[in-house]
Amino acid sequence: MIRKLKLSKPVLNREEKRQLKLDAILRHAAAAFMDKGYYKTSLDDIARLHKVTKPTLYYYIKNKEDILIKCEEVASIRINGLLDVVTATDETGFVQLQKFIEGYVEIVTDDIIRCHIRHRGQREDPQARADSLEMHRSIEHRVREILGRGMTDGSIRDCNSTIIAILLFDALNGISAWYRDEGKVNHEDLIAQVLLIVTQGVKSQV
Amino acid sequence: MIRKLKLSKPVLNREEKRQLKLDAILRHAAAAFMDKGYYKTSLDDIARLHKVTKPTLYYYIKNKEDILIKCEEVASIRINGLLDVVTATDETGFVQLQKFIEGYVEIVTDDIIRCHIRHRGQREDPQARADSLEMHRSIEHRVREILGRGMTDGSIRDCNSTIIAILLFDALNGISAWYRDEGKVNHEDLIAQVLLIVTQGVKSQV
DNA sequence: AGTTTAAGTTACTCATGGGTAACAATATAG
DNA sequence: CTATATTGTTACCCATGAGTAACTTAAACT
């Protein structure tokens, strides 16, 4: 027992510990950004949340904007991962769309993703700006392909997939700004309402 | 003719001229905020656009945040005006909803409204914050009433009007961020696509 | 024409906050 | 148990930009 307390080799190696700390910083930063906004949150605020001093942050991040970029990476991986899963099946386009929506509502609840959605498009660095735009375009393109698939297989009515994809994302991304797990709106209810919109709109069918 | 050049009474009195200049400043500021964002736009930037110096702005506005507040006033008047017109008719709830959507897409294209939508929710002053929230709640409430009317008269299917109103606003407000009059997407097409979503979703009806 | 009020300018103050240099402590490896 | 890389700290620099004081120019009313 005593030997276990004084392990010669630590349970986690340096790289893993570093990664965990970076994650924690990202989470603290994301929470603060969601609360007060990017510009009203100072690096000192974030450092305080993490119980370190500001210069320590620079061991994990390049600069303030780098936090947003790292949040974006996380978002990109999760959203593209979902799209991979959804498009790997041989379901109809409409069913794939439904599955995507269900998964996306889940993803959009995570603090780091929330932060990314709220602050995307305010990149200062031109390269980061371009990367961000490219990721956005690519994801939207993959959703348009799902819509196209549905129109081909007949599960989705003829529509302008460009416009529909944008409207869909705006509605879903908006969820990140207001939905809270502890809030009044129930999670299943939310998904059900969104799915009903895409299946039949709001007009009562005669 | 020469007498006309030297009018003893100007065409516009002081109050009117002042109002026109305030409007112009608001427009310049809104354009700059949409381009670079609120925090990356300095008052010097705005002054330069208006071809005056910074202190002159303080003759028309109280402080930087006051610009956002004045944009909000404009937005409130236009949106509530639209709602007044739409709800004054004795059409069914669904038709009222359609008319509201058509009008809202029009409103959301204006630069000052665009600016308000993008920057609402970052009020610093507690009072302004509360006012902003209240306006937002009130407008959302009026749309929920339209949905309720539709459910009562049978033109709108049974739904959670709270969730639907939020999703609808997020999709419509999103338009302000990407739609451009000179862009690829055609105005009529946009409205048609939105209306088709609310009337029948995207699923092909069997 | 001369007085007053509106409109605008130049030249500052001053808080904030991102970023860094130089130094201190702690943990891992040999 | 010492040498070295890793984390972390204190104390600073400095650009930016909101807001103001004091002064000048232009317009309007009598």
Image (tube, coloured by chain):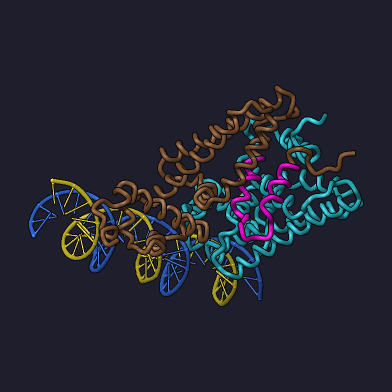
Chain colours: A cyan, B brown, C blue, D yellow
| Residue B76 drawn at (x, y percent) | 49, 39
The quarter of the image holding the C terminus of chain A is: top right
Q: Residue at x 58, y 30 (%)?
A: B141
Pick the front one: B108 or B41: B108
Left or right position of A102 against A92: left
Does residue B140 appear anywhere in the picture? yes
Q: Report the residue at 43% width, 52% height from top.
A: B26
Name the image quarter holding residue B102: top right
Residue B29 sits in which quadrant? bottom left
**Residue A1 placed where, x, y %?**
70, 48
Horizontally, residue A73 falls left or right of residue B199, namely left
Residue at 48% across / 53% down in the picture? A41
Q: Is A118 within the magenta? A: no
Instruction: Point out residue B118 in the picture as x, y percentages from the top left corner.
Output: 54, 50
Q: Residue at x 32, y 51 (%)?
A: B11
Extent of the magenta region: B168-196
